Amino acid sequence: MENLTAIIKGKQVPQGKIKVSGAKNSATRLLAASLIADEEVRLENFPTELVDANHKFDFIRACGGRVEVNRKEETVLVDPTLLEDKLLNDYNYPIRTTYLLVPGLLKKSSNAKIPYPGGCKIGDRGYDLHIMVWERLGAKVVEKQDYIEVSAKMGLKAGEIDFPITTIGGTESALICSSIAEGTTIIKNAYISPEVEDLIKFLRTLGVKIKVIGNSFIEVTGKDYLQGSIFQVMPDRIEALTWIVYGVLSKGDITIEDVPFNTMEIPLRHLKEAGIDFYKNSRNIHISPNCLVNGAIQPFELATGTHPGIISDMQPFYVLLGLHADGISRIFDYRYPKRLKYCEELIKMYPDKVDWETGKITTKGSKNTVPVSATVVSTDLRGSMALVLGALLAEGESTINKVEMALRGYNNLQEKLQKLGVEINIEG
């Protein structure tokens, strides 16, 4: 999927129901983790259209694994019994989390040749912590021209992994690897996000013994034979927030189904404090034009951080909210202070309304704000989706280049908007 362009007519008012898909950041991890099983695994509520997931399907099949995808029922059946390490003709798989494919191959072949993360070659060492995990558990790692080779001729052995920084990817890597290591592995300074909790739940269904103490200490006792599983992917909390914000700003009348309330308590509290009063039951949220308590979004200040707070991936949607609030709002991002590139594009739709500096974005909103149509370029996944929403709210027709960035994180985006009566035209 290369260089797609979205042509979007603004001022379409959404009406109807929209269902939150399975979480991208959980589904792709569970797919990789299912490779360590010794029986079939069925993943339900799986976002089957995601680009990253489809590249993983291809890689697993190239290594002898069987993957059956039912796009209608949103299920993926993985049979890893014939998976084996092979020397492939091509390692050009743009998978961001290739390192999670290592444990499955190690278990079946004592060897794993995987593409460099994101398809990048030697030079970008964004995977040092994964090398640390493999080596602590007794594996040897060699960086070749086209792939990383990890070998453990006698299998992985339990060890102690103490992360120097909090890392979701490193924690996921350590969890899956230690599930097949002999003995009990200690993981310190782990980052247990809701998606990592989903992974822990899944590994337990395979028969792995995992003990979590506090919010950063994990003990994993590896197991030789791992049974199959039928497992439901958790709904995507970032997608849920996206549709809530869109419903509010568009003055639409929409029901958002499958909202993961247990992972969104603080993000939703901030919406309430901004004067947004939505209806909810145990699974859904209803947004309508009368959900603004004072007829306007109240300006706010907030800082992103780690879960259970507002995570950095949610930051662009609060910026959008601030642009339509009745006054000045400030959004601080201490975790990813340089997450600002999309602001250079967003300001084309909201001239003179956004200021930014490292770690801080200031919005000069008004309850009568209407963005102007513009031609913009996507810079990152969530920033790209903020541009899509801006275009949907704008007066006139906008063009968003490289919109495939948004499609990386939003399953069936066009079809979902269509169900709300909203058309966007994507051209390749």
Image (cartoon, rainbow, N blue to C red):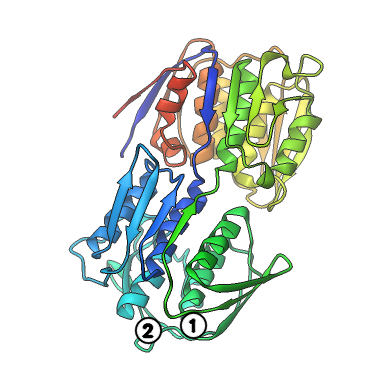
Residue type at tag 2: Ala
Residue marked by disc 1? 137
- Classify 318 as above or below 278: below
Q: Position of residue 128 (x, y in %)?
A: 49, 71
| Residue under label 2 | 152
One can see residue 348 in this view: yes
- Is disc 1 placed on a helix, strand or loop? loop
Picture layout, residue 302 above or below residue 250? below
Q: Position of residue 113 (x, y in %)?
A: 30, 71
User: Quadrant location of residue 86?
Assistant: bottom left
Residue 166 sits in quarter = bottom right
Can you give x and y, in whole percent of width and height, for residue 20 in the image? 53, 36
Closer to the camera, 398 or 196?
Answer: 196
Name which residue type carries label 1: Leu
Q: From what the image shows, is residue 294 above or below residue 273? A: above
Q: CA distance from mark 1 to mark 2?
A: 9 Å
Residue at x-position 31% and y-position 39%: 1
Within 10 Å of disc 2 (Cα), the crowding (few <14, some 14-19, many 20+) is many
